[in-house]
Amino acid sequence: MKKQRVKKPPEKKGKRKKPAIRGKLYIALFAAMVIFTAAFTIFMAVHFHAFVNRPVETSQPEERPVEEAAAFSGGKETEPPDAPAPESKGALVFVIDDAGHNLDSLDPFLEFPGPLTIAVLPGLPHSAEAARRVRSAGKELFLHQPMEAVGGSSPGPGAIRAGMDRDEIRAVINRNLDELWPVAGMNNHEGSRITMDEEAMHAVLELCRERDILFLDSRTIAETAAPQAARRLGMNIGERDIFVDNAQDRESMLFYINKGLLRAEEAGSAILIGHAFSSELAPLLAELYPDLKEQGFSFSSVAGIINGTH
């Protein structure tokens, strides 16, 4: 007997189409990915180019035309603000007595950068020239009027002496003033005996008022009658606070200057008297000047203190 072939059942047509459809889907997905990748690459390339070539910002200010800049600054060049000024600690007045003996000792004081009051003695070989130099240097000039002291020692030429009447006192002072004129004021050289005499000081201050000059009481004695005479005349006078150079060495002068600084801080001002013969005083004052200014001390004249304009 012949074996009969068993026929396989015919395949259904629908099942053959599945592989073709899946392949098309893969192709479409791949094409989409290619398109997306290309688009993303182009997008990134464009933005990277824009980032690299962007303008670089700097911290420099925008430039303005000259006219605009001037208008912006109010027509003035702008500058950084100044450092705040130090708090005021008071005014200092340095009076240098006994000028007129020689010119060499005077010149260093004329070079001092701030205000000074220099009192010139009358009747000496260099008195008139010393007065002229003081004025030329822009310093305040005083007559250093000699007056008799307790003990009777001679105070020098042109002195007011005990027993002089009003007219004699006026004649002496007028002669001395005329030798040095013009002057801003006068103070006493020695004079403890005269300044204790209220009537004598009344005659002195009366003449000061007539000639429109100031008076500074050097206070060579505590019992001075100058303040009482000034009150009778309705006048303001100055009074010495500190003698700087009782000894002429640097340490001693620094000690008394520091006392003057304390006085200025307490009272608002201090009048300190030194002498032209103190060779260390002028360089010491020049050395201290910038530091004292930086600390807040100002430098003034006797007129500034008496008139209240310091």
Image (cartoon, rainbow, N blue to C red):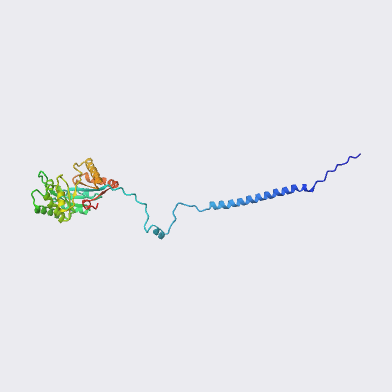
| Residue 21 shows up from this direction | yes
Residue in the picture at 73% in, 49% down? 21
Q: Position of residue 140 (x, y in %)?
A: 21, 52
The outermost residue toward the right is: 1
Q: Position of residue 98 (x, y in %)?
A: 17, 48
Count of marks placed on residues: 0
In this view, the residue in front, 86 or 122, is 86
Task: Classify residue 151 as left or right of residue 103.
Answer: left
Q: Position of residue 272 (x, y in %)?
A: 21, 46
In this view, the residue in front, 64 or 127, is 64
In this view, the residue in front, 81 or 287, is 81
Quick one: quadrant of the N terminus?
top right
Task: Classify residue 294 as left or right of residue 123.
Answer: right
Residue in the picture at 22% in, 45% down? 281
Q: Position of residue 6 (x, y in %)?
A: 86, 42
The outermost residue toward the top is: 1
| Residue 126 shows up from this direction | no
Residue in the picture at 63% in, 50% down? 36
